[in-house]
Image (tube, rainbow, N blue to C red):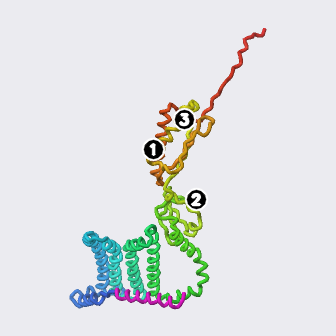
Amino acid sequence: MNENNTTQTQEIIEQSQEIIQKLDINFFPQVQSWLNQLYLSKYGDFFDTLYFDIPLGNIITAFFSFFFFLLLRKLFATLVIKFIQPLTTMTKNSYDERILLALKGPLTFVFIIIGVRLFFALLFWETPFINNIISSMIAFNLFWAMYELINALRGIVYHFTSRINPELSYEVGNFILTIFKGIVLIIGLASILDVWGINVGGLIAGLGIGGLAFALAAKDTAANLFGSIALLLDKSIRIGEWIKIGEVEGTVEDIGMRTTKIRSFGKSLITLPNQLIANSPIENFSRRGVRRIKMTLGVTYATNSQQMQQILIDIKEMLKAHPSIAQKETMLVNFTTFGDSSLNIFIYTFANTANWAGYMNIKEDINLKIMKIIEDNKSDFAFPSQSLYVESLPQPNTSTNN
């Protein structure tokens, strides 16, 4: 990584640290001033008793303050749900409600940070280690809020991508959101590491020295990333489509930066690397528009030629009149073979849907109508059977041996 990128990253981290320091609200002087007045009162002999070199008044106030801010956290969460959130439903847009719900967690976590900060301050445990923990909590909360805001405002991203490519707005939008989330996570982690004195700039610069090893280790990740870009540009699959890749068949649930998740018809979740998908034949059933109906019927040998002709005519007319049969596609109804135990009729046509449930309903209706046609023509379906014909039987021997 070059020196300019390293400098820019370090500047972002330093700006984050400034925000963290401004959020570090210090209540300790005010509370300690009140405790000092308590120690000078007539109850001072009791409260200024030392335990582990800490006055009893400070110990009691430390635990009371911590649980007090935990209670405030619960009260604030209740206030948001019962009073503030209903007000957001009165506005025309839904983003204010989404932002409020997204920031609910980070805002309530602020009370925990203040409670922990005051707890350790009252116990005089303001060591560098404790201060680093509190600063890390503030940094975590700050970038957690940013992360949740990205989720809350994802509708804006989808609206933007729909103007560029309406067909792939959801997939491209998810791709952009993943990049934004990744940036927030990386900067947030770098800020926390900087709190603990880890030289992030040196770490980033070190990546440039070991760039070859890093590139070799990340080659599969890079290949999957370019595979996901290829899938989006080729428009070969979309979320919600029914596809088959090799032995994997199911519905696309998510197209990520590295993998694609497919929900099989057995409800198991299958995760495939995008590199594999981009380099494999993809059978997309959702885009075919029609679905084939292919069957062979067998009627009994008791069916004569006139009955057979009428059955073929009735089946063809039924299929041509059926509203769910694709009339522009191939349609075949033929008496094909003399089977071992049946006269076989071949039927080949297409239902005008790719939906599995709709296809099954259409096929069921076709089967019932064919059964009715066979019954109306005084014929019957054959089943595997064998007939044994005996030409003659040996005459019994009536002669009597003397």
Q: Nearer the viewer, residue 134 or 282?
A: 282
Q: Secondary structure at mark 2?
A: loop
**Pointer 3 residue:** 309
Task: Tell me, for residue 321, which label it has, or none.
Answer: 1
Calculate the distance from the C-alpha at mark 3 to the C-alpha at mark 1.
19 Å
| Residue 140: image location, x then y, percent | 41, 80
Circle nearer the N terminus (2, 1): 2
Question: Residue under circle 2?
Answer: 247
Callout 2 touching callout 1 (CB < 8 Å): no
* Residues rendered magenta in the picture: 1-23
Measured in 3D between alpha carbons, the distance from the residue under mark 2 to the one under mark 1, in whole angstroms, is 37 Å
Residue at the extreme front of the image, as rendered: 328
Q: Which mark is residue 249?
A: none
Mark earlier in primary sequence (3, 1): 3
Name which residue type carries label 1: Ala
Q: Which of the two discs, 2 and 1, sits closer to the camera?
A: 1
Examine the structure image and report whether residue 135 is included in the region drawn in magenta. Answer: no
Circle 3 SS class: helix
| Residue type (three-letter) at the residue carrying disc 3 | Gln
Q: Quadrant of the C terminus?
A: top right
Magenta segment main secondary structure: helix
